[in-house]
Amino acid sequence: MSRWSYFLRRLVLSIPVILFGTTIVFMLVRLGPIDPAAAIVGMGNPQGIERIREQLGLTQPLWQQYIDFMINMFTLDLGQSWVIQPGRDAYSLVASYAPRTIWLGFWSVVIALFIGIPLGFYAGLNPNTGGDYFASFGGIVWRAMPNFWLAILLVSVLVQSQDLLFGFNWSNWLVTTDILSPPNLRFLSTPLEAITNPIDWWVSTGANGSFLAALKQIAPAAIVLGSASMGNEMRIGRTAILETINSDYVETARAKGVSGRSLIWKHVFRNALIPLVPIITGEAFLLVGGSVLVETVFAINGIGYLFYQAALNADLPLLGALMFIFILITVFTNILQDLLYTLIDPRVGYESE
Amino acid sequence: MSETQSDEEVPLRDRIAANPRPALQWLAGALVLLAVEFGAFIGVIIQLALTAVRLLPSNPGAAALASAGEAAESIPTLLTRGLIPNQGYQTASGEWMGTFLGLEPAYAWLLRVVLIYAYAFVWLGWFWVGYRWFRKHYRYADWTPRDDVVDRLRSHRWGQFGFVLVLAFFVLALFAPALGPTTVDANIQSPYTHYTKYYDDEIESVSNVTVGTANLGSTSQGAGGENVGPWSYDDYGRFHPFGTLTDGKDLFTFMAAGARISLMIGLVSLLIAGFIATALAMLTAYYKGLADLAAVITSDSIQSLPVLLVLILASAVFGNTWIANLYNGAVLLIAIFSVTYWPFFWRALRGPALQISEQEWIDAAKSFGQKPRTIMQKHMFPYVVGYLLIYASLTLGGIIIAVAGLSYLGLGITPPTPEWGRAISAGQPYVATASWHISLIPGIMITLIVVGFNALGDGIRDALDPQSEGGEDTGGEAAVAGGGGA
């Protein structure tokens, strides 16, 4: 099977996956014991419940509801919130909560990449030295810490940084920011000002916020959310380097007289990156789940927080819509992963099956 | 494993009958070991049966089991709080009354803990002796591939480190009632129906007070005198190895009981998920084609749902219903973990199972006319089961984290049943104060245990398959080990 038809096959397979995943969500949301009408008007109002049922279409037979639900989801009609903000479109809710989560997710991937991979490569290039053991063991412990616990620790340390870190004050460092507050991302809506009004856009702490302030606010949460991936990237990076450095083609290149620097960058480094691809894309999965806990601890009102609130208040349609979005994100990241693999590694498609 | 020489092979039973001495010796040793802890052993079994019975609709025989449990408590047992008590009071002259040999409660408790762990390690050693004797006296082959696996594990320091951590955790969970300085029932569930004695300086005599009242006087809330830290006594002469919770309950007792429920959830859901995955892996590897495709789609769909979010969703949807109250909510968690984790296992088993199904001996068995079921059980399963162990070890840590994360959010296991995440949540405001222990100790323990499970998983993988080193499926492995992002 050529690699592109392998990729095509994966693409086609993702359709039933989305269908089936959405069906599971429907079953969880609609077949569960919660009566959405009662959740809206309260138990003591039977006529009200009956009327709401009528309005929501809950009196229709189940298969009809199922078909409606699926059609709505697949035409991207995500419906409305019933309980949290009654009558508000799921779209507009997501649109107002999502940017902070995306900002958080983006930085947690980037920070994890820029710390994890270099550390892993360092450990792999200096195997069995003190530095390697320190980095490897640190990575293992770092990965094992529960995210929410790490977040609690970090918050406490930062809040009391004046006392705990020898007078270093986190909230006044560089720019003044609060620790337990969502980042202000309004500056992103005026990207042109990055050039026309650079000081305000990059550094200042005005009403629109700035790049630096938003980055500083999100950094602790991003480090926590990326901690597991950081550990994984380190570990895989280390083994990948060790495997490549001992492989025949590196041996050959060395025998041929390729200089050390070129050997590392051209022959070792590039090949060692291949096994890291699924780790990086697999992060999307961890981020979606982990965002609930991390956003709760750091008081960031993002998608994870919205989902948690919706679950607590039994806002079923919003829950369904959010789950559908999460399914789409996961499936498309998987497709992206396959695409990257297909582009990077010509061997894909031949060995599987 | 292999039955190639079936015509000359004598069944193990006959081999033991021919030379019964080592087997009898081993059995006698095991019986002695069992006898000293027989009461606790029966207690655990009755507890398990009781838990299972309470899940059934009409509680058949629950009362009989409960009375049997009470009877089991009166069986003399070596390592109990009854025999080595650590609860007592200190008279004005500084003497301790009511503790083991008049020792200070801390040392009485420590003695019990050391003895329990020593007991567990003696058992472990006895099993090792049993294995060696089996190899020496009863096994035909001088060498089997399993021996290499064991040898590799014996020289794998990192895996052994993990094994010790995991064993310490298992012992903590298994001996939870005897390890705690006090009991869950007296200290956590119903403190106002239990009494504790203490020496009252004002009236200069011993007084009785409910545990609940004593708890109110030994809270840990950070500021000033309101703190009972690790390895200290409260005003009522009670010893707290890990300090107290914000409401004055003993943290160590809480942790030990929480370990029990976490481990229970983890093990049962692993068993179910492992069973589904193995059965499916056999079927898909044997029949291939459409069966495989259907399993791929199903597992991909389930894997596309983030585990933690499904847990939150299900806790919300099924909250306050009968199913959420079964075994304090653990049954619901077990169900969700089983359903969401089998695809990870199946993914891990699929490759090896497919490889095995291509082997010649499978072809041979088919043409020989063996039933598919027999082929799968006898000729495929033994080669695949090792991979299950690797993933089981990695997943257990993830499940413990996920359960803790869920109870941190206030979902999952219903209070007042102890769960580690709830301690972390309770201690959150006090992390940087004198009461740091409430949040930090549970977190450190989770980290240690997850490190232990990961190390053990690494050890088993390297022992089973020394060439693998990482493998390709590390993405899924990582997701599992991280508890789906909790």
Image: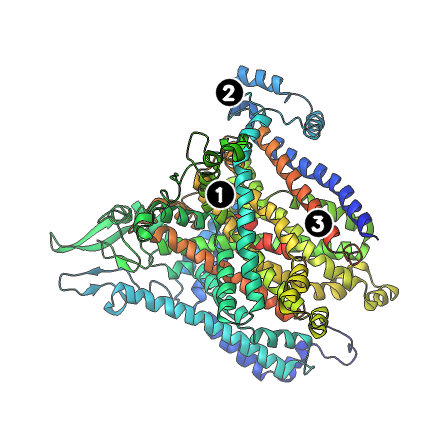
Q: Name the mark on residue B69.
A: none
Pointer 2 indicates a residue of which chain?
Answer: A
Q: Position of residue B51 (x, y in %)?
A: 50, 50
Specify which label sits upstream in the sequence, 3 or 1. 1
Vertical arrangement, residue B42 with respect to residue A195, above or below: below
Q: Residues within 10 Å of mark 1 (few under 14, many from 20)?
A: many
Residue type (three-letter) at the residue carrying disc 3: Leu
Residue type (three-letter) at the residue carrying disc 2: Val
Instruction: Name the residue beneath numbered marker 1.
Output: A293
Q: Residues within 10 Å of mark 3 (few under 14, many from 20)?
A: some
Specify which label sits upstream in the sequence, 2 or 3. 2
Q: Nearer the viewer, residue A334 or B292?
A: A334
Q: On the picture, is A248 further left or further right than A292? A: right
Instruction: Name the residue beneath numbered marker 3.
Output: A340
Q: Position of residue B78 (x, y in %)?
A: 38, 69
Q: Quadrant of residue B7?
A: bottom right
Name the mark nearer the viewer: 3 or 1. 3
Instruction: Name the residue beneath numbered marker 2.
Output: A41
